[in-house]
Structures are given as structure tokens and as C-alpha cells.
Amino acid sequence: MTIDRDRLESRLREEFGGSSGAARVVSRQAADLADAGRYEADVGAELTVDVVLTELADAPDGGPPERWNWWIGSLELAFGGYEEFAVRRHRE
């Protein structure tokens, strides 16, 4: 199932601040991860806007890209194969 990118982008800005570009790139990566089906296969649960927000809230600090990369790093350590979903660069 595809994640609602617009809703996620809006919620990311509400919850964690940052620029619209930062929230946009994270919502795009989240949609790609959901479309790939890897998270659902590894965890046994659908990747939703609420799941992303909950997981990113556990990150120690930062805006959406830093929090996203922290979470993707944990998934990479636990399961492998998540590095491609990390945010490498984003425009402010």
C-alpha cells in the first residue's frame, strides 16, 4: 500500500519542524520504502504515516531527515537492506 505523502509531509513539519524540502524528501523516501514492501515483510506491519511519526519521535534529536536517517540506520542494523532509503541530501 502506498503511504499518503502529502499527509506525511504536513505531519512531519508539524511534529519536527524543518523546511518543506526536508519534509518532502523524507515523505518521498517513506513512500518508496512502503512501495518496496520491505518494511512490511521484515516487521509484519504496514508502513503508515502514524508508524513513521512514532518511530521518528524516538530519535534523539534533529529535523525530519536526521530523524529518518536515525530510524533507517536502526532498520539497517536489524534487518539489512535499508541503506538505499536513507536521505543523502536535500535542498532547503
Image (cartoon, grey):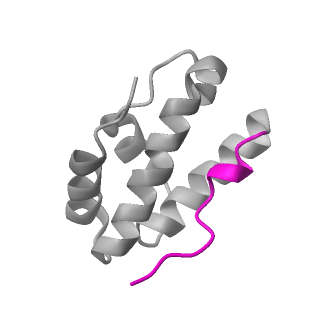
Which residue is pictured at 45% across the width and 73% down the height? 62
Q: Nearer the viewer, residue 72 or 7?
A: 7
What number of labels is visible?
Answer: 0
Which residue is pictured at 63% across the width and 70% down the height? 88
Q: Nearer the viewer, residue 48 or 89?
A: 89
Q: Nearer the viewer, residue 62 or 69?
A: 69
Q: Is residue 38 magenta?
A: no
Q: Is 29 on the left or on the right of 57, as rendered?
A: right
Most common SS among magenta residues = loop
Which residue is pictured at 73% across the width and 51% down the height? 83
Which residue is pictured at 25% across the width and 60% down the height? 15
Is residue 60 visible from the viewing direction of this image? no
Q: Is residue 83 magenta?
A: yes
Vertically, is 48 above or below 56? Answer: above
Q: Is 23 on the left or on the right of 26, as rendered?
A: left
Q: Position of residue 1 (x, y in %)?
A: 40, 22
Is residue 26 visible from the viewing direction of this image? yes
Q: Position of residue 60 (x, y in %)?
A: 51, 64
- Quarter of the view holding residue 48: top left
Q: Position of residue 28 (x, y in %)?
A: 43, 53
- Specify the quadrant that holds the C terminus: bottom left
Magenta region:
81-92
Q: Position of residue 57 (x, y in %)?
A: 40, 53
